[in-house]
Image (cartoon, coloured by chain):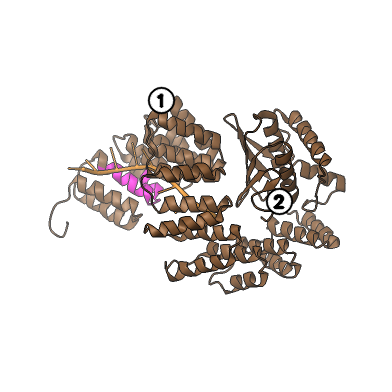
Chain colours: A brown, B orange
Amino acid sequence: MVRAGAAPTPVTYVSVLSACGKGRDLLLGVQVHKRVVESGVLSDLKVDSALVGMYAECADIDSAWRLFEEMEVRNVVCWTSLVSGLARLGQVDRARELFDGMPERDAVSWTAMIDGYVHAARFREALEMFREMQYNNVMADEFTMVSVITACAQLGALEIGEWVRAYMSRQGIRMDLFVGNALIDMYSKCGSVERALDVFNGMHSRDKFTWTAIILGLAVNCHGEEAIDMFHRMIRVSEVPDEVTFIGVLTACTHAGLVDKGKEFFHSMTETYKIAPNVEHYGCIVDLLGRAGKIMEALETIDQMPMTPNSTILGTLLAACRVHGNSEIGESVAERLLALDPENSTAYILLSNMYAKANRWEDVRQLRQAIMEKGIKKEPGCSLIQMNGMIREFVAGDRSHPMSNEIYSKLENIIADLRNVGYFPDVTEVFIEVAEEEKQKVIYWHSEKLAIAFALLSSEPNTVIRIVKNLRMCLDCHNAIKLISRLYGREIVVRDRTRFHHFRHGLCSCKDSW
DNA sequence: CTAGGGTTAG
């Protein structure tokens, strides 16, 4: 346009600056900024806002601030640009300060703030903000709902998610593609495949995200074969898969134990779809081989992949060594893992569990002593559960809950009931070095057991109990929850760090390998 | 006509 000699107008600048922001092209943005100044366009609210927005989107917050402060007239748009820019850079608290000082806030500003909390993984604050938004009588729209639904997904907050759906239909907020995709993810992350499929089946249009969401949802909820069917359907309707889609497909193969299929997909991903595998894809393959007991092949995969192994992938292999009692390779993998990350508590835990499985109690003892001496701290176990619209958090050994006494005595009753049907506490995975009796207390007080005791106290009979746990469940909790599901006739769904466990009638969907 | 907010893994 410039070369053709046509004079840009403010409208041109606004459009071009928006493009620079969305394309994260700061260099070009700065050039356009210069042109704006040279062209002598007097301060124009929209151009100035576009400039602030461009700098904010290109992560140059200082320039954005400076321009913002120089503006003589500001409106809600440039305020929101700055709030959103700060939030995206991870400075949520600074964003919140600015947000609180805004002279006027609309749905966009509220959504920017809610989404800021979501991206900072502060989901409860995101929901709190949404509540405040309603309190302030600002109408939410599809954008708001996506952020709120995402927060529910991460929290495993199905009740709130369902409330959000009802709210949407009350408010006449329609379910567009983004909302639909977010809902599929939310239901999947809450362990409800049925509802995820309902949304999926009811969608008028679908994109790559839709298919990827349902594939992942099916995969982590132990519906591996159906996830793979979905992938074939996706290809049939000519949707192009990306690297995340393949994470889903490979995860499906892992959880369904389909080793050869997994290898085939890995191959077609590179050959047919020309997607370069990243370390997570290799991680899926290592997991796939490792779970199937092909430890050597898994090790070779790590040694032959084009990138240096990170601690996650070594941890995956170590976990496989534990499951299959291969302490020879396990020890060398643990060594590599600890060389990479000496404070890695996962390495110690897996190594200790592996020794325990091999009945190498002297090694277990020495390891535990080393852990104590080095002061290695295990990440505290933590379970979320929501009940009657409230999200409760339980940490192992937690006594902070107002119903604490009742919960602990309920737990004692549960354990007595379990013992009557043959349960015996399995303390082999207890990490700390204490007397045998203490170890039993330690596992009784694991966060998921506390959460279940609370749930049995405060929920209607026959309702599904849903728990989100930050770590992998221990063997004892897994055993205990299987029995609880039978004894109390409850379906219990636990979302663990990587997958779901659906407990029903004394059995778990993971078929005891996780 | 033009400025701000939304989805998938790890």
* Magenta span main SS: helix
**Horizontal relation, residue A69 to residue A484: left or right:** left
For the residues beneath circles 1 and 2, the answer to whether they share a chain is yes
Q: Position of residue A419 (x, y in %)?
A: 82, 41
Q: Quadrant of the N terminus of chain A?
A: bottom left
Circle 1 crowding by C-alpha within 10 Å: few under 14, some 14–19, many from 20: few
**Secondary structure found at label 1:** loop
Q: Please say whether residue A45 is one of the residues in the magenta stretch.
A: no
Earlier residue among tags 1 and 2: 1
**Secondary structure found at label 2:** loop
Q: Position of residue A120 (x, y in %)?
A: 51, 44
Disc 1 to disc 2, C-alpha distance = 44 Å
**Horizontal relation, residue A166 to residue A124: left or right:** left
Q: Position of residue A111 (x, y in %)?
A: 41, 37
- Residue range of the region highlighted in magenta in the rendering: A47-65
Q: Position of residue A9 (x, y in %)?
A: 17, 47
User: Amino acid under label 2?
Assistant: Lys
| Subunit bearing disc 2 | A
Q: How many marks?
A: 2
For residue A450, which quarter of the picture? top right
Q: Identify the residue position indicated by label 1 in the image.
A: A137
Q: Identify the residue position indicated by label 2 in the image.
A: A378
